[in-house]
Image (cartoon, helix red, strand yellow):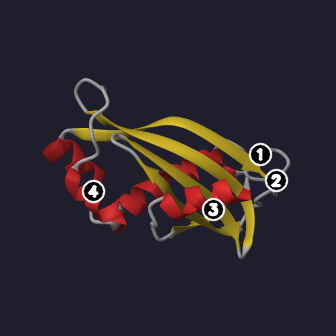
Amino acid sequence: MNNLNNTQAALAPQIKPFAWPVRVYYEDTDAAGVVYYANYLLFMERARTEWLRHLGFDQTVLVDQLGVVFVVRSVKIDYDLPGRFNDLLQVTVEGINVGGSRLELTQRVLRGTECIVQAQVVVVCVSSLTFKPLRIPAPLRSTIN
């Protein structure tokens, strides 16, 4: 099994990890004083938006000029440790697989070097009018491959 995982890792596109800082505000926490679990999805969404912007692709331009949006198809998430009020976190985005219309990403939430949350996120490129899947635009595909 390790050989299979190593082979898959070697074949996967090598996309440099992108990190976006997030400060935990009081409004992000629950009654126990830790980050409310659903807020990690918000943090990850913001990081993906900033990752695209960092690559030179503003989502408004993707809609206006190319007629595409990215929608979340699935998320598998593991919560390992709690984030707390006033923590400074880093939310990372790494591409693990680029398909015709799909991007499979790994996202992590780090407190220093400690991974507190990890998710496998699948987003799909769709028409902004019909919401039917479309191929990832060539300029974006060539940038992330």
**Tag 1 secondary structure:** loop
Cα–Cα gap, marks 3 and 1: 40 Å
Could you tell me the amino acid type at mark 3? Asn
Q: Could you tell which of marks 1 and 4 lies nearer the N-terminus?
A: 1
In this orientation, does residue 69 appear?
A: yes
Q: Which mark is residue 91?
A: none
- Give the image location of residue 48, x and y in percent: 45, 55
Q: Hey, what amino acid is under mark 4?
A: Leu
- Crowding around mark 4 (Cα neighbors within 10 Å: few <14, some 14 to 19, many 20+) is some
Mark 4 and 2 residues: CB-CB less than 8 Å, in contact? no
Mark 4 or mark 2: which comes first in sequence?
2
Q: Amino acid at mark 1?
A: Asp
For mark 3, give the secondary structure.
helix
- Can you say whether 116 is above or below 72 in the image? below
Residue annotated with mark 2 = 33
Asked if disc 2 and disc 1 are in contact, CB closer than 8 Å, the reply is yes
Tell me, yes or no, if residue 57 can be seen here: no
Check residue 140 in the rendering and tell me which mark sits there, or answer none: 4
Residue under the point 35% across and 68% down: 54
Q: Which residue has dot 3 on it?
A: 6
Taking the image as shown, residue 80 lies to the left or right of residue 24, namely right
Q: Residues within 10 Å of mark 1 (few under 14, many from 20)?
A: some
Q: Which residue is mark 1?
A: 30
**What is the spatial separation of the Cα atoms under label 4 and label 2, in whole angstroms?**
40 Å
Q: Quadrant of the C terminus?
A: bottom left
Q: Residue at x 36, y 59 (%)?
A: 52
What separation in Å lies between label 3 and label 4 (alpha carbons)?
A: 27 Å
Q: Type of residue at label 2?
A: Gly
